Image (cartoon, rainbow, N blue to C red):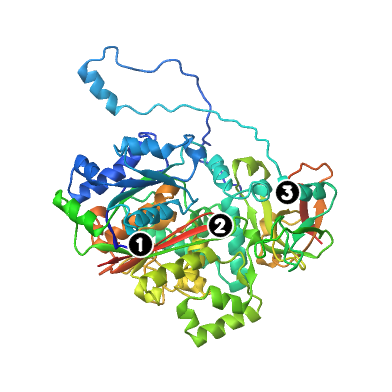
Amino acid sequence: MTKIPNKQAESLGGTIVHNLPFPLETSPEALAWLKHMAPIQIEYPYNVVYLHSYAQDSPWFAGLTNKKILANRDPKTGYTYATPRAHDMYTGDETDWIDITDRKATVHAFTVCHFGSEAFLDETPYVLALIKFEGVNTLLLSRVMGIDPDQASLEWIGMTLKPQFLRNSKLKPTDVYFVPA
Amino acid sequence: MRPVYAISGGVSKFAKARPDKTYQAVVKEAYDYAINDLGISFPTFTENVDGSVASYFSDHFTRQLMAAIMAQDYLGLCPKPSHRVEGGGATGGLCFQEAWKSIASGHMDLVVAYGFETMSHVETWKGNEFIALASDVSFDYPVGGFYSGYYAMMVTRHMKEFGTTVEQMAAVSVKNHLNAYHNPYAQKRNRYTIQDVRNAPMVAWPLTRLDICVMSDGAAAAILASEEGIIQLEKAGAKIPRPLVKVTGIGRGTDAMRMADRPHVDYDYFVKHYATQQEKDSKETLKYYQELWEHGTRYPGVHSFRAGRTAGNMAYKHAAIHDPLTELDFIELHDAYTSSEIQTYEDLGLCRYGEGGPFAISGKAFLPHIDYGLDLADKPVCPVNPSGGLIACGHPVGATGLMQTVFAIWQLQGSIHKHFEDKTLQVKDAQKGAIHSHAGTGTYVTVSVLEKE
């Protein structure tokens, strides 16, 4: 049964105010009353456009645009990072790029977000998962599509997945997502 | 290093919004309370205090860079030395430890640590967006950045790995909310059942709204002193309760911002680098861990916080604690999520890794004399979050670790009744307690041990 809302949703925005109640004369009594007044609250928009550089990780995003999932590997130890890292944590050495697009991928951990940050609220419910690739030491955070968000189950952990790529890449890590293989 | 004492504290009422006061004035509520509790005047304290450390998490929430200096000047502390500390959710715990350093090093004799956060100036989901910016903005945030989602992923792994259940998590929520029922500083003072927690709106499966702490406006302040500082303050007329509360253990740990990057180490490495001394000393526990590893468990993965384990081990070594469960009389633990309280039981060695779920419903972390409406097999041993924790008190980030400090001071002074006007939450004969402050998905963690001298 659909739940009937019993509360009006709160939002900002509203009437533009050009004056406020204030004592007509600033007598000592009137001034003392000012300490008992409710606070004035104003809206203050704040918008910024950043020029964000993917810097040394840029090839990973270029890879997604070209339907390839890249990873970084330490040339000596072979320790491999699914999320790009230009220098290895353990040797301090510069890592190399490798292609892991065709490696077996499985769900290591997941959730279904029924709420989210403001930027993603419109996309709820969505499935977030940490993806494990065969022979790769670290994980990749991604979205999983093609499974019913209302049927979340621990059985999903270990599920084999295959990558899908946006045809029109957005140069975001969401250019790749996963579906059951 | 010199002995350091935590002598007084104050907490503002934590609330969803405090439009009645600027953050500076909210800090002053906590600060004035701490000074009044020493029985001296504002000018006398100002004259004697050597400096301060300030903590707040987010410049986005305040929309005011260098907000701390505006609190410093509002409190009349200029031109005394100060600095701001920031480390996500652990900001307050780091602030406390920085104040400790200033005194332990001999640099200062009397320091005030104050913290605050103003989270009400943006709408809840924008606030969640700001908090999610404390994840990698290239690789984590754009995928659907949401901290409740991150913690939910960790706990699905914990559930899969160890069999932890949603009912065990809900028991933490019942405990902490019910404890807060007796804490007038708490934002949420409600009686819930396991069913209430599970029936609350689902936020990020399997975490419901009652598994998750709320955003708050609030402030807290703690006053730390050396022996010389205490003598000086008492000469100035302060009344400092005896026995004193001494800071005896300081520990910190860190981990990678992206939880995807965390290692999955083998058994030998785990035992050598992460096992507690108590675990290393127990053949039975080592066998238990060997079996876990044979079944595929690796450490820390995303189910455990090695930063928390590292901080705990360091603080326990400093405070000469071998068995935290029986040696600590209480812990104020960073329960941003019911799941993270369970994960942290394990990190702090209250139980072994994998046993956090059963521990949560054992009764060992509950308070006596409160009817939780749960069937608990064991008697309380080490109450966790007797104050109600973040889940019920609220989480004004920069203030949270200091709120824990203040509640710990009051527990050890035996003065809960005086400050709460209710003695229910007083841990009887509390001698030793720990405060645990935790950031990000386990990126910075502090553990500090306080004890009655």
* Residue A109 place in picture, x, y as percent: 66, 63
In this view, the mark in front (1 or 2): 2
Is the residue marked by circle 1 packed among few (<14), some (14-19), or many (20+) residues within 10 Å? Answer: many
Secondary element at tag 1: loop
* Residue A27 place in picture, x, y as percent: 22, 15
Task: Answer above or below: position of B71 versus B419.
Answer: above
**Residue receiving disc 3:** A56
> Splitting the image into 4 quarters, where does residue B441 fall?
bottom right
Work out how far the residue at label 1 is from the one at label 2, CA to CA, in angstroms: 24 Å
| Nearer-N-terminus badge (1/2) | 1
Secondary element at tag 3: helix
Q: Residue at x 63, y 43 (%)?
A: A121
* Residue contact between numbered discs 3 and 2, judged by CB atoms under 8 Å: no
Work out how far the residue at label 3 is from the one at label 1, CA to CA, in angstroms: 48 Å
Left or right of B202 on screen, residue A68:
right
**Residue receiving disc 1:** B386
Work out how far the residue at label 3 is from the one at label 2, CA to CA, in angstroms: 25 Å
**Residue receiving disc 2:** B441
Secondary element at tag 2: loop
Q: Using the image, name the chain to which the residue with label 3 belongs.
A: A
